[in-house]
Image: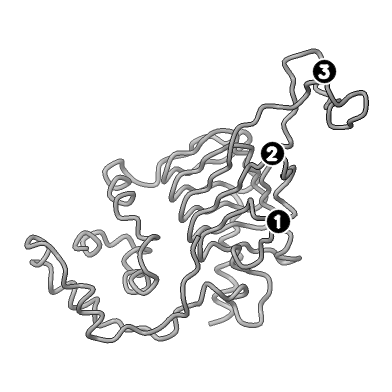
Amino acid sequence: MKNYLISFILISCFSPHAELCSNAYAMSEKETALSLSSHSPRREKETPILEEIKERVYSNIPNSANPFPLKEDKNLCFINRIITNPNIIAGYYSYYYDPEDVFNFEKNVLYHFAILNDKLIIGKFCQIGTNVKFIMNGGNHRFEGYSSFPFQAFGGDWSSIPTLGQIKGDTIIGNDVWIGYGATIMPGVSIGDGAIIGALSCVTKNIEPYTIVGGNPAKTIRKRFDEETISFLLDLKWWNWPIEKVTQFATEIVTGERSKLSTL
């Protein structure tokens, strides 16, 4: 089983291609029934499906408070358990994989100067591959004049020379985003929920939800789903559910069984 998990993680670093939960616990049958009973009259017609799902009871949900969720494997970490910079925020269950050192994650958030106060905000359940880099606003140079050299940064008699580059705001990664090996995310970019970023891509512009992009600069390859399905998923927001509910319906989420998810 462990080898299967390791293989899956390696594949998830693909090429081409804030809250912490409490300790996991099993829902009692009564609790499960209550959580599934508050449906509108229309949805009550789907009770056979709900009855099937409510029978699933779990007692070993991975704990997001554990920085290294794969036993005896320190190559994968939950990001929110290892970051120290208060201007980096990551949602629970978002992970980073690095066979060299998972603490490279924070090192790969570049030009992140406290004086600029820009933030890297990562949603929940994101999957971030090895050597992904985030370029923050401190890496911008002013270039509309005749030189892009940052004189002001060196102080002294140069301290009043206005060479600060454009500040493009926070970098925001949505929920359930997959960022492939070696991708680079430029300052102030927003990546929508469910997007997929191909390996070695350079993302220079905002990416819409559930869009697959690749290349340098990254361009749209295709949408993952039709617009109606994307709207359904953005309304569903499964990543905001209690982890017990996510666990109950994880099979339906990853296999795309909309008929069952539509009953919720």
Residue 68 % position (x, y): 62, 75
Q: Is residue 224 above or below residue 22?
A: above
Within 10 Å of disc 1 (Cα), the crowding (few <14, some 14-19, many 20+) is some
> Dot 1 lies on which element?
helix
Give the amino acid type for the residue marked by disc 1 in the picture: Glu
Depth check: 192 or 227 in front?
192
Q: Is residue 128 above or below residue 82?
A: above
The mark found on residue 262 in the picture is: none
> Dot 3 lies on which element?
loop
Give the amino acid type for the residue marked by disc 2 in the picture: Leu
Left or right placement of residue 176 versus residue 155 in this view: left
Residue at point 21%, 59% (across, down): 262
State which tag comes first along the sequence, 1 or 3.
1
The mark found on residue 106 in the picture is: 1
- Residue 131 image-quadrant placement: bottom right
The residue that mark 2 highlights is 116
Residue 140 % position (x, y): 72, 31
